[in-house]
Image: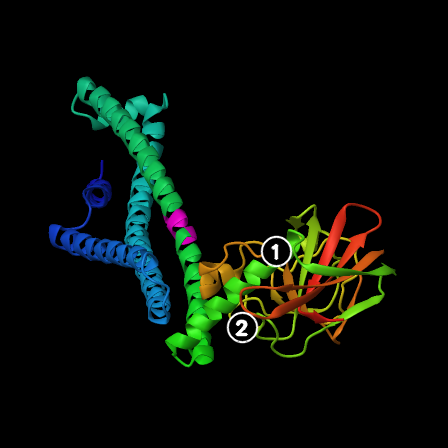
Amino acid sequence: MKIGKFKIVIFALFLLGAFLLGKTTLAQETTEQRLQRLSTEIAQYEREIARLQTQANTLNNQIAQYDAQIRLTTLKITQVEEKISILGGRIDQLEVSLTAVTQAFSNRAVETYKMARLGDVFFLLVTAPDLNGAVSRFHYLQKIQEADRDLLIRLQEAQTSYVIEKESQEVLQKQLTEEKAKLAGQKAAKAELLRITKNDEKRYQELLSQARSELEAIQAILAGKGTETQVGHVNEGERIASIIQGASCNSSGAHVHFIVSSNGVTQNPFSHLRGGVSFENCSGPYCGSPDGDPFNPSGSWNWPMNPSIKFNQGYGVTWAVRNTWLGSIYSFHNGLDFNGASSEVKAVRTGTLYRGSYFGSSGCSLRYVRVDHDENDLDTFYLHVNY
């Protein structure tokens, strides 16, 4: 066997050993210390967020939660990036080892094959000092070949496992990057909160009180506690109300709160409203934000307002519930909030029209209309409207 081939094998085994043993002690300690520091800081911020959530709902507390969440996610992203970098270096090292061992294995496999041929017996006899030496060399090369094959398989398995782990880490990094984008949205929500409250605790408590009062009113209306007057029969598409322009009872801006209910149990309006309408999604931290609520109507009903629809909040656990102070008041949004191209509100189906209002603890009267559908047990409610 040539000296150069031995050098290749030794070099490959050295690289493999370096991979298996890891980096030098100093580098390993540095990496471990860095990851340990990140883990410690992450745990600290998780405890801080938990502590803040148990405290009184104040403006300062809400802002502190925003800041802690943003810092927590940033630390997690840094931690994952560090792990990905470490794995990437190990994978590169494995590739170098794999290439070297593959080349050495290929060279020796060719030589072994040549020596195994019948015509090579004479070559063995004339080049070896004796017959025993020739046979020993032949068997030695076969054993080396088997060892190389085993080494090659183990290297490939190790490389595959680490590639999979790196891909998993990259998926995690992507998830965390998306979470960071969401938290950037929370930062925008924080800025908006400061803008509308002017960093005034009294104003913040007024907003909380307003949200509580609206929740109380909506729950009461769905339970049949509103004061209603039957108007008569209306057809699909017929005008039944108009949205109130500007602020109104428990509402800071013009929109209709649209609810679909069956015996007091709400349903997702998107399951009934038709798709294909023009819209602007303003349900996130800003209009057009990628992390707002999904706009995914899939039914057959025409919309109660003419497009283009300005979509403010979806159904269920919405972006506002997850990321703003509204989440401290309610955990589930039971309808859709939106506006249209005009103030006109129309019946989505044929039925009996009722005009109603609810006078709650806030001291104001929340106006709404209800349509009891002819075709099924559904009712649709349209809140924050004028008759």
Q: Tell whether position 276 is magenta.
A: no
- Camera-nearest residue between 271 and 59: 59
Q: Position of residue 209 (x, y in %)?
A: 48, 67
Residue 370: name its quadrant: bottom right
- What amino acid is at disc 1? Ala
Question: Disc 2 residue type?
Answer: Tyr
Mark 2, residues whose alpha carbon is within 10 Å: few (<14), some, or many (≥20)? some
Label 1, residues with CA under 10 Å away: few <14, some 14-19, many ≥20: some
Helix, strand or loop at label 2? It is loop
Residue where numbered disc 1 is placed: 220
For residue 275, the mark is: none
Q: Quadrant of the C terminus?
A: bottom right
- How many numbered marks does the figure carry? 2
Q: In the image shown, does 247 or 304 lie closer to the viewer?
A: 247
The reply to whether dot 1 and dot 2 touch (C-beta < 8 Å) is no
Q: Quadrant of residue 134?
A: top left
* SS for callout 1: helix
Residue farthest to the top, as pictured: 132
Query: Where does the magenta region start and end?
Result: 166-171
Can residue 309 be seen at all in this image of the molecule? no
319 vs 209, nearest the viewer: 209
Q: Would you name the residue on which mark 2 appears?
A: 286
Q: Earlier in the sequence, mark 1 or mark 2?
A: 1
> Horizontal and vertical percent for residue 223?
64, 51
- Dominant secondary structure (helix, strand or loop) of the stretch shown in magenta: helix
Most foreground residue, 25 or 334? 334
Residue 169 colored magenta? yes
* Residue 331 appears left or right of 20: right
